[in-house]
Image (cartoon, helix red, strand yellow):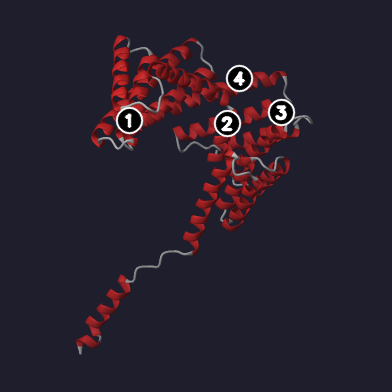
């Protein structure tokens, strides 16, 4: 599944992400409730906050709110020092310590998620665990460099395979009662494609073609069963998902057809427009992609949250176009050396 397709899948599963956000928000409220968030704080105030956080952590180091409180206090202090040109060595030390607590925080949540999954094996619990492992992988990569978090990433992928396996099973049970439900058909298409994607992440020799074809078929069933009163902002995603599957199956013509249908249904939809621009770019139609992106951006207001993202994409495509239109000139060292060799072997300098 393409990056665009995977991003769309995560967007559709935002309920789980909201749960994660709530947990983070709790940590933030605990931290700010204890420390305050005034921009007038001094270094001494932040040092006091860190001391208070250390005391709370020492009292119960297994309480997630205390671990996250340590991370938040240190991270806030680092931010203050960075903005006030503090000592770099101190900033580096405190930042590393903060990331360590971030990893510890998600380690605790991962333990709880594993226990929850063992008690009730299902998609939600497995997926939540995978998300916690993802955060740990990020933290470990920050602490250890490029090789950091590799093992955690593998474990995360394994749990995503487990999660999506449950998701496929759960949706199939629902579809048995309402086999023509467009939303459920699209959800199953998402889940089947995502499961294949993560299996390929586990083993890059895994053939994803059958699942991607199944996913495309399911999207087409969903499109055929779209209710007349369905909001276009929802229906358009069925076409975008189908386009992503068709592209991954190397059926460019069909992918383009689905993107055009999506844009006709919802002309201002970000995923449809950027997805179509990406398709054109990936098949070498750079000028068309750039023209299309500029036309799409012209439809948006500057305060639209998508405007800046489209601008960044346009700049990236323009940079790529400039590189292709103006390739660097080959170095002439070899030619000069060749002339010197000719002169040395039989040229005028030998006479």
Q: CA distance from mark 4 to mark 3?
A: 16 Å
Front residue of 104 and 188: 104
Q: How many neighbours does mark 1 have within 10 angstroms: few (below 14), some (14-19), or many (20 or more)?
A: many
Q: Quadrant of the N terminus?
A: top right
Q: How many neighbours does mark 2 have within 10 angstroms: few (below 14), some (14-19), or many (20 or more)?
A: few
What residue appears at the point 32 percent right and 14 percent down from the top-left corner? 57
Q: Say whether disc 3 or disc 2 marks the residue closer to the N-terminus.
A: 2
Q: CA distance from mark 2 to mark 4?
A: 19 Å
Front residue of 182 and 302: 302
Q: Which residue is mark 3?
A: 182
| Rendering coords of residue 123 (x, y %) | 54, 20
Q: Which residue is mark 2?
A: 11
Observer-side mark, 3 or 1, equals: 1
- Secondary structure at numbered mark 4: helix
Front residue of 274 and 283: 274
Image side of residue 237 versus residue 65, left or right: right
Please say if the residues under marks 2 and 4 sit with CB atoms less than 8 Å apart: no
Q: CA distance from mark 1 to mark 4?
A: 45 Å
Q: Quadrant of residue 144?
A: top left
| Rendering coords of residue 22 (x, y %) | 50, 20
Q: Which residue is mark 4?
A: 170
Q: Which mark is residue 78?
A: 1
Q: Say whether disc 2 or disc 4 marks the residue closer to the N-terminus.
A: 2
Q: CA distance from mark 1 to mark 2?
A: 32 Å
Q: Say whether disc 4 or disc 3 marks the residue closer to the N-terminus.
A: 4
């Amino acid at each position: 599944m393409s990056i665009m397709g995977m991003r769309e899948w995560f967007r559709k599963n935002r309920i789980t992400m909201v749960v994660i956000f709530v947990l983070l928000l709790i940590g933030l409220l605990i931290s700010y409730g204890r420390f305050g968030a005034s921009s007038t704080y001094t270094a001494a105030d932040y040092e006091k906050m860190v001391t208070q956080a250390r005391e709370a952590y020492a009292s119960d180091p297994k309480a997630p709110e205390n671990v996250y409180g340590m991370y938040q206090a240190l991270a806030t202090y680092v931010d203050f020092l960075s903005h006030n040109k503090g000592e770099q060595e101190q900033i580096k030390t405190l930042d590393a310590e903060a990331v360590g607590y971030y990893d510890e925080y998600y380690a605790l949540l991962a333990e709880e998620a594993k226990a929850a999954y063992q008690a009730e094996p299902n998609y939600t619990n497995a997926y939540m665990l995978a998300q916690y492992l993802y955060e740990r992988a990020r933290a470990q990569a920050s602490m250890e460099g490029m090789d950091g978090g590799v093992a955690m990433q593998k474990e995360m992928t394994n749990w995503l395979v487990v999660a999506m396996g449950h998701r496929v099973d759960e949706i199939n049970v629902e579809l048995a009662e309402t086999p023509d439900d467009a939303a459920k058909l699209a959800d199953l298409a998402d889940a089947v494609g995502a499961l294949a994607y993560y299996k390929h992440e586990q083993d890059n020799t895994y053939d994803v073609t059958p699942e991607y074809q199944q996913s495309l078929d399911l999207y087409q069933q969903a499109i055929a069963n779209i209710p007349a009163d369905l909001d276009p902002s929802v229906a358009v995603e069925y076409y975008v998902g189908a386009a992503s599957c068709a592209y991954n199956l190397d059926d460019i013509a069909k992918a383009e057809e689905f993107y055009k249908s999506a844009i006709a249904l919802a002309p201002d939809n970000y995923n449809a427009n950027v997805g179509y621009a990406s398709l054109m770019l990936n098949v070498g139609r750079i000028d068309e992609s750039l023209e299309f992106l500029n036309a799409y951006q012209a439809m948006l207001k500057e305060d639209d949250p998508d405007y800046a993202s489209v601008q960044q994409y346009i700049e990236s495509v323009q940079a790529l176009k400039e590189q292709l239109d103006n390739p660097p000139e080959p170095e002439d060292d070899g030619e000069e050396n060749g002339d010197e060799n000719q002169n040395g072997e039989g040229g005028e300098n030998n006479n």
